[in-house]
Each structure stands twice: as structure tokens, then as C-alpha cells.
Image (cartoon, rainbow, N blue to C red):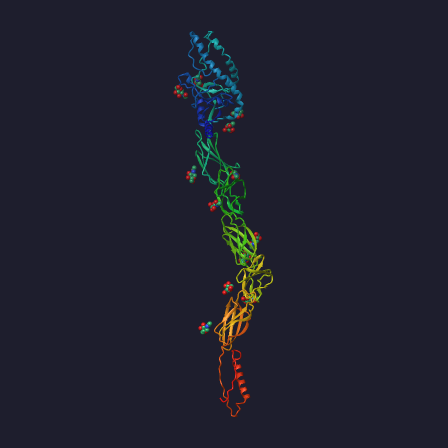
Amino acid sequence: MGKLLLLILTWALMLMHSAAEPLFFHNDSTLTWDEARSYCQVCFKDLVTVTPKYSAIIAHNVTSDYWIGLRKNSTGNSSSLSWSRWANGDRLTFQNWYPGWPVFKSPVPKIDCCSCSCTCPLATTPPTTTYTTPDVTNTSETLENMSSYTNVTGLNTAGTSGASISGLLPTSIPTLSATVAPIPVEATCGKTPIPVPDLPDPNANYIEDSCVAMLSIGAWVEKNCTDLLPFICYEDRFSGKVSVDNVTANSALLTWLPGPGVINYYRLEVTNLTGGNMLTQNMGLTLKYSLGDLSAGYKYTVTVFAVKCGRDIDDPQKTSFYTIPNKVVKLSVTMQTNTSITLSWDRPEGNVDLYRVQYNGTEQNTSMKIVNTSGMEIDRLNPATLYKFSVWAGVNDISKWSDESTVNEYTKPGTVSDLMVSDNTDISLNLSWSRLPGEISGYRVVATNDSNYIFNATVVKQPPFKIEPLPPGTKITVNVTAQVNGSLEGGTVQVVSYTAPGPVSNLTLSSTNSSLTAHWIRTADNFSSFTVELQLDGGPVIKTANTSDPYTTFTGLKTAAKYGVTVYSVSGGLRSPPVNSSIFTLPSPPSNPSVVSNTSSQITFQWIAPQNIATAEYSVRLNSSFWTQTWSAVVNNKTSYMFNNLTSGTKYQFEVRTKAGDLLSDPVSLTAYTDAQLQSISFSMLCSSAQPLHCDNDTIREKVFQKLNARLIQLLGDSVVWSITKQQSENV
Ligand SMILES: *[C@@H]1O[C@H](CO)[C@@H](O)[C@H](O)[C@H]1NC(C)=O
Ligand SMILES: *[C@@H]1O[C@H](CO)[C@@H](O)[C@H](O)[C@H]1NC(C)=O
Ligand SMILES: *[C@@H]1O[C@H](CO)[C@@H](O)[C@H](O)[C@H]1NC(C)=O
Ligand SMILES: *[C@@H]1O[C@H](CO)[C@@H](O)[C@H](O)[C@H]1NC(C)=O
Ligand SMILES: *[C@@H]1O[C@H](CO)[C@@H](O)[C@H](O)[C@H]1NC(C)=O
Ligand SMILES: *[C@@H]1O[C@H](CO)[C@@H](O)[C@H](O)[C@H]1NC(C)=O
Ligand SMILES: *[C@@H]1O[C@H](CO)[C@@H](O)[C@H](O)[C@H]1NC(C)=O
Ligand SMILES: *[C@@H]1O[C@H](CO)[C@@H](O)[C@H](O)[C@H]1NC(C)=O
Ligand SMILES: *[C@@H]1O[C@H](CO)[C@@H](O)[C@H](O)[C@H]1NC(C)=O
Ligand SMILES: *[C@@H]1O[C@H](CO)[C@@H](O)[C@H](O)[C@H]1NC(C)=O
Ligand SMILES: *[C@@H]1O[C@H](CO)[C@@H](O)[C@H](O)[C@H]1NC(C)=O
Ligand SMILES: *[C@@H]1O[C@H](CO)[C@@H](O)[C@H](O)[C@H]1NC(C)=O
């Protein structure tokens, strides 16, 4: 609705505007009406047409009679059509006759027909007087204000400036008021018969071919068309505009409209912003011109004057335009953070009033007035993101923009957060951190040990990351920096941690039957302490010792048991990898061996287990040196053993040891005999001697027996059960 209203309003305004505004040109040369009209038609549009709106303006500065564009139509048969149209064809909608004008041709008066001749002139007079009075007063009131709308142009080409009828002016005004008075005469006219013979010729003022002149008071009178008078021409104000096309940085194509009427030539004037006149040129009748040699980004004003009869017609066609500025040069990024980028560029040659900056379709600070070297900071960007920045140079009225200059750049990545170290070992650390937004190309990890680089610029795609190998028991400083585009880095974040100490070396164990001692060699650093754990036979930890010495002793242990020992170095709360070893405590020997039972071929032994034994394993052995027999066995979980297949009556040596792994305790031993199954073996010895009766000598016999007995003792000893007795038989 509002839009429609606006549209109608605009249309109405345009209509009003297009109703041409006339301009008036007074010419003081004197010409006949026809000559004056021809002149007006050539140099302006026509002789003036007077309308109520402009009559005051036209009458301004009129000091004598001037031709205006009205002539009697002598071909018109009816008197009312004699004054119907102006010279330019407009209808005569307004008349401003001086009283008594126009003059119509009267029929020849007859004396005997006085009543007729009396009524005719009186009937026509009253209407003219009613027009005249108000117009004259109006005109004289507004005259002073109208000077700017009219122009009196001197006509140098024709006539002289004579024939002034300004003498009429002072006398006319009193006449005017006198004319108003006769109105009541009309009433008396019919009543009083007028004496006929003294009347002047009623057609004395009648002009057959009459043209209209304007008096200095603005009222009109008829004149002989061949009289020489100054005249007033008019011309509609010309409205046109130069159009500018194909504007470049240094050229433009100008076109303009043809002026009204017969134009002699067009004059083109180009000025620059400072008003310097760049070009004034007679263009002949051409209606376009290609303007060159302009400077980029400057404003130019173009005026085209249409020249007619040596005069610039009103108004000249005019326009202003800017040439396209040159594009900015050396556009570059001078600084970047994770959320901002600072651009800088050089002002191009020519003029630039402002710049427009955009990135990825987003307008930034629409325009800025910047002179000389220029730049700007663009903030609120996303980190680690590629942006395309475009800069245009522009002119004050933002009608022209240069070509685009572009630069692509990444914002810096942000700073890594939540950097943490976990799983510290003696050779590695596990790093983790939060991933950063944007197009992170990697994370640079640098690990240093005091001032020594351990890791140089290792680029990691994504967390987590394990740093190894590292020296054990060392303070490690780690820097993590995010990178974008492989080189552009964000802030560095640092974390300090330690590697665990290295394992101990050369762990050696020694044991007694109730204690265990561990020795080891500490690793390079001297600050570690140690934790030693003791386990029994792969079971849970039963004792823990903390020491700062490289050895420790556990006492009160089980005998003949397998103990495991684990040693850790400890430093800064971190444990080294474990070092293990195991050893058996020495076994104690069993005690109180005894024979439980024996037969001729079996002996069963038993013994008492040593105290504090963990696992009961014994090694038993039985041997007879006489028979060179040996038995041995390992006894599990029992404290007795039976030997079979023994030889009767034999002395056996029994030995039992506690066994722990490969270790054996000292033996306890016992001697026992199998039951003897006695047999008698008889043998006889015959004595013969050269000396008679020598064999009967008891002493000798006893001596031999003793020798035999000694020999048997030597051979059998107590290894077997035996005895020998002697019987003497005579005369055998
Ligand atoms: C004069 O009047 C006649 C008849 O009314 C008309 O045809 C003619 O165009 C008029 N001439 C002028 C100049 O007005
Ligand atoms: C009126 O005449 C005076 C003196 O000749 C002149 O200065 C002035 O410009 C004229 N005004 C117009 C509207 O022609
Ligand atoms: C009238 O015309 C003359 C000559 O063209 C010019 O110098 C003068 O400025 C004009 N005066 C007005 C009021 O337009
Ligand atoms: C008009 O003037 C011309 C020349 O001066 C003359 O011949 C003619 O008679 C005049 N006409 C009238 C009606 O006065
Ligand atoms: C502007 O230039 C183009 C190419 O040079 C041409 O085709 C076009 O006709 C020109 N426009 C005018 C109005 O001359
Ligand atoms: C404007 O034109 C004048 C005369 O040609 C010249 O001296 C001046 O330098 C020009 N100014 C600009 C800004 O181009
Ligand atoms: C901006 O535009 C450039 C070029 O077209 C493109 O490579 C980049 O990914 C864009 N960045 C964003 C944030 O859209
Ligand atoms: C690591 O880089 C630093 C500086 O860039 C350099 O001085 C050092 O020698 C490098 N160390 C190694 C092990 O590459
Ligand atoms: C680690 O970062 C800190 C600052 O955060 C810096 O002072 C130090 O030089 C960096 N170390 C290395 C090896 O880059
Ligand atoms: C530690 O043991 C290794 C081999 O087991 C041996 O070569 C080295 O000499 C031992 N070190 C010491 C100090 O006993
Ligand atoms: C030892 O004896 C105990 C109890 O008599 C029994 O539980 C265990 O299994 C035995 N061990 C062996 C190795 O025979
Ligand atoms: C005794 O020895 C023999 C032969 O060596 C064997 O066959 C037998 O089984 C053994 N007797 C016992 C009780 O061990």
C-alpha cells in the first residue's frame, strides 16, 4: 500500500517536473513582429506566450512596448476566433488587454439609426474593464521579486534601439482609473439619446493586421505588425544529462542528448575534483566522446553546453563520475594470532578514498577512510582456519570499486590444553592432551633433559604419544606446540616429569637355613632408594623391606624353602622395573635316626623331621661296603623308609639328609644289621711236621688258630655276622 502510494507520488512529481519551465529572453533590438518571431524561433523557441503564472515575470524590466507571441487571425471569420491561439499554438486561455483593446471593426455609423450605434460599443466595454483592474495591481506588487527568472538579451544583429513607446507609460495609469469610472454610464446609455454628428471615426484605432505588444504595465495593446518593436522570446528550460559508460581507471565514454531546436554546436568541458579544467572542446554536433588520460579513482565533472546563436542554452547537460580506482598492491598478512589476522597493503597509484575488506563472504567494517599505507586487524576468527581475504579500493560515493586483491592465510592454532604425562617408565613417558579445533596439521613435541635435546621437533598427528627411549631416572621437560599448514605454530605448553629409575643390576642371593641376604648394584644415579619384596615359592609377598643400601637380609625364614626376591629402585615415587631372583634356604638335617624293624632282608628306618620345614623331602642311602651294595632313594612327605632285598646278617650303613631343591642337608647316619641266618662251615687243618710231636704242641696249635682268626677278622671284620671255634681231633 505504502509502496503504491510512493509510486503514485513519484509519478506525480515527474509529471510536474516534465511540465517544462519556460525561460524568457527580452530583446531590445527592434524588429517587425514577423522578424522577431523568426528570430525567436531560430535562437529560442518562439515569441513569448503569456500565462497568468509568468505574466509578472515577463513584465518585469519591461520599460517600453514589446512584441509578444499573439497575432490576430485575419482568416478567422468570426470575431471571437480572431484571438484564439498563441504563436506557439497554445490556446489563449488568458487575456490581459489594456482597456479599449482589442479593437473590432465597426460598421459605418448612420445618423438615423442612432439607437443602434449607441448600444453596440457600450455592450463590449464592460467585460474588458473587469480583467484589467486586478492584473495591474498584482503586477506592480510582485515586480521586484522576479528579476532572476527573466533575462534580457541584447540582439546585436538586427535593428536599432529606437522606437520606444515608453512615453505611454506614465499617461496610461491615470487613464486606467478613469476607465473604471464609466461603468455607471452603461445605465444612462440607453436612456439618453446621444447626438450623432460629433462622434469620431469608430474605426480610427482598428488595425486590420494586428499583432500584440505588452505595455510596461503588463497590459496588452494591438499594434501594426510592421511596427519595429523590441520583443520577448521564450524557450523551455532544457533538461538533459550526460551519460557515462564503460568507465575504466583512465577512460570513459560520454554520450549526451541533442539540445532543443537548431543547435550550432556542443561544447564539452571536463573538470577534475579540484576544479582544474582538464578539457574544453568544441564537439561540433557529435553526441558522444571517448574521454581518455584520466587518473584512477578521481572524480570528474563533465558539462556539455548546447550552443545556439552564440548562446549556451539553459541548462547545460552535466554529470559527475569517478574513474575506477586501481587495485591495492602488496596485500599481505603482517601478523596473526589464533583469532585475528592483520592485513596490510599499499595504496595504489591514483586516488583511493576508502577500502572494503571481506573474508569468505563476510563483510568486515564495511568501509574505512584510510590514506597512505593501509591495513587493518580482523578479529573474531576461528583458530587454525584458512581464510581468503579480499580488499577493494573504493571512491567516496562507493560507486566504483577496484579489482579485488586477495590473500589466503591461516589463523594460528590455539594452545594445547590438558597436557598430561602418565605411565612413567624408566625409558618412556605417555603424553596426552586435548585435541584442538581447526585444521591442525600436527603437534610438535620437544623433549629436553636439562639443556640436552632428547626429542627434536617430532610431529605427532594426534594424541596420545609415547616418548621413548628416554634416559632412566631423569627430569624430562616436554614442550607441545600445535601446528597448522605444517609450519605455523600456536602457543607452546610445557610439562615437567620424570622417568622411573632404571632397574638394579647383578642381584645375588645367598642363604642359610633360616636367613637370606640379597646384594645388588645400584644404577647410575645415587638418589634412589630400594624396595625389596620377598615371596615364598611364588606366593604372595610376605615381607617388604625399604632400604637405601644396596643389600638387605631377611631372617626367620623357613628352612629348605624356595624364596623369591624382587628389587625395585624407587625415586620420586616412581619404581623401576623389577629385578627378580630366587634361592632356597639351606635345609636342616633330620634327627634321631632309628631302626623300626628289621628282618634278614629288610630294614625299616625312621627319623624325625627338622623343625620349621616347609616341604618334606629326604634323600636316603644305604650301603654295605662288604657286599659293595648301595641303595638310595628320595622320600617324599614321609619320615621313614624300608630297604628290601638286603643280605642277611650284614652290617648296613644308613644315611638320611633333608633335601631342598638341589640342596642336601648334612647327613645323619646309623648302622644296623639284618638278622643273621647262621650256617656252620667246618674245615679241618692237618698238621705235619718234620719235628715229631711238634703238631701236638698246643701252643703251636693255638698260634695257628690265632693266625686264622686274625685273617678272618681282616677279611670280614664286623661286616657280616660270624664266629669261629676250634675242635681238636687226635689221630686224624
Ligand atoms: C485562423 O482561423 C482559421 C479559421 O478559424 C483557422 O483555420 C486557422 O488555422 C487560424 N490561423 C491561426 C494562425 O490561428
Ligand atoms: C532589469 O533591468 C536592470 C537594469 O537594466 C538589470 O540590472 C536587471 O538585471 C534586469 N532584470 C531582469 C530580470 O532582466
Ligand atoms: C543573461 O544573459 C547574459 C548573456 O547571455 C548573461 O551574461 C547573464 O548572466 C544572464 N542573466 C541572467 C540573470 O540569467
Ligand atoms: C501599417 O504600417 C504600414 C507601414 O508603415 C502602412 O503602410 C499601413 O498602412 C499601416 N496600417 C495601418 C492600418 O495603419
Ligand atoms: C563498452 O565497451 C564494450 C566493449 O568494449 C562495448 O561492447 C560496448 O558497446 C561499450 N558500451 C558502450 C555504451 O559503448
Ligand atoms: C586538475 O586539473 C588541473 C588542471 O589540469 C591540474 O593542474 C590538477 O593537478 C588536477 N588535479 C587533479 C587532482 O588531478
Ligand atoms: C575460505 O575460502 C577459502 C578459499 O575459497 C577456502 O579455502 C577456505 O576453506 C574458506 N574458509 C572458511 C572458514 O570457510
Ligand atoms: C635439536 O634442535 C636444536 C635447535 O634447533 C639443536 O641445537 C640441537 O642440536 C638439536 N638436537 C638434536 C639431537 O637434533
Ligand atoms: C619450551 O617452551 C618454553 C616456553 O613455554 C620455552 O621457553 C623453551 O625454550 C621451550 N623449549 C624448547 C626446547 O623449545
Ligand atoms: C654384573 O654381572 C655381569 C654379568 O652378569 C658381570 O659381567 C659384571 O662384572 C657384574 N658386575 C659386578 C660389579 O659384579
Ligand atoms: C604329604 O602329606 C600330606 C598329608 O599327609 C599330603 O596332603 C600331601 O599331599 C603329601 N605330599 C606328597 C608330595 O606326597
Ligand atoms: C629282590 O630282588 C629281586 C631281583 O633283583 C627282585 O626281583 C625282587 O622283587 C626283589 N624283592 C623285593 C622285596 O624288593
**Residue 494 sits above or below residue 663 on the image:** above
Residue 201 showing in the rendered view: no
What number of labels is visible? 0
Q: Residue furthest front?
A: 730
Q: Nearer the viewer, residue 547 or 148?
A: 547
Q: Position of residue 116 (x, y in %)?
A: 43, 9
**Location of residue 679 with respect to 88 vertically, above or below:** below
The x, y position of residue 638, in whole percent, is 51, 67
Task: Give percent across and percent down for residue 305.
Answer: 47, 32
Q: Position of residue 315 (x, y in %)?
A: 48, 30
Q: Nearer the viewer, residue 31 or 136?
A: 136
Q: Is residue 248 visible?
A: yes
Asked if residue 64 is positioned above or below residue 458 in the image, the reply reads above
Identity of the residue drawn at 53% across and 22% down? 143
Corner quadrant of residue 81: top left
> Can you tell which quarter of the image residue 284 is in?
top left
